Image (cartoon, helix red, strand yellow):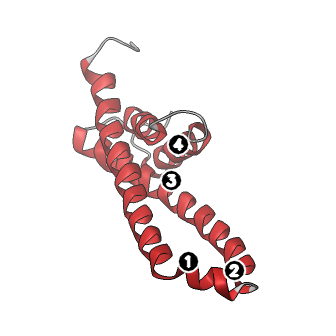
Amino acid sequence: MGDGDTLLNVVIGAIATAVLGGFVPFAPLFGGALAGYLQGGTRDDAVRVGLLSGVFGLVGTVLVTLFVLLVLSVFLAFSPEALAAVGAVGVLFLIASTLTAAAYFLGLSALGGWLGNYVRYDTDLFS
């Protein structure tokens, strides 16, 4: 389908991650595997495509998170006591959760890209 078409394979993998993300654990692994399988080429190409698929998925997640934070900040703006309670702990939580999400999406997507290439060339699973 998208053999060697990097952008198409990245988008397909990111869409698979987004669709599966709501109910399948480790969805970036499956999205990266799909992108790596479709990409073909060397394992390095598949890992790169899987990683890019994770970047696209991470960007989508960050945008949704920013929207939720915007909505919460509107509610907090009307309550100075609640805003003060969130303070530094909220900022530290935001930083830690962003780093965790980045490691989750990028690591699993790159691993999935490698696994997708492995399944395509080194197994008889889909031949």
Q: Is residue 122 left or right of residue 22?
A: left
The residue singled out by tag 2 in the image is 76
Q: How many callouts does the rendering have?
A: 4
Q: Earlier in the sequence, mark 2 or mark 1?
A: 2
Where is residue 73, by image quadrant? Answer: bottom right
Residue at position x 67%, y 88% in the image: 80
Q: Is residue 76 above or below residue 99?
A: below
- Tag 3 near tag 2, CB within 8 Å: no
- Tag 3 near tag 4, CB within 8 Å: yes
Image coordinates for residue 76, horizontal then vertical, percent: 69, 80
Q: Find the distance from the CA under tag 1 to the CA under tag 4.
A: 31 Å
The residue singled out by tag 1 in the image is 86
Q: Residues within 10 Å of mark 2 (few under 14, many from 20)?
A: some
Task: Tell me the quadrant of the picture where the C terminus can be found.
Answer: top left
Residue at position x 72%, y 84% in the image: 79
- Tag 2 near tag 1, CB within 8 Å: yes
Q: Is residue 15 left or right of residue 42?
A: right
Give the secondary structure at mark 1. Answer: helix
Q: Residue furthest bottom?
A: 80
Q: Is residue 21 above or below residue 92?
A: above
Q: Is residue 109 above or below residue 69?
A: above
The residue singled out by tag 4 in the image is 17
The residue singled out by tag 3 in the image is 57
Where is residue 116, by image quadrant? Answer: top left
Q: Is residue 44 above or below residue 100?
A: above
Q: Amino acid at mark 4?
A: Thr
Q: Amino acid at mark 3?
A: Gly
Q: Residues within 10 Å of mark 4 (few under 14, many from 20)?
A: many
Image coordinates for residue 78, horizontal then vertical, percent: 76, 85
Image coordinates for residue 52, horizontal then vertical, percent: 40, 54
- Viewer-side label of 4, 2: 2
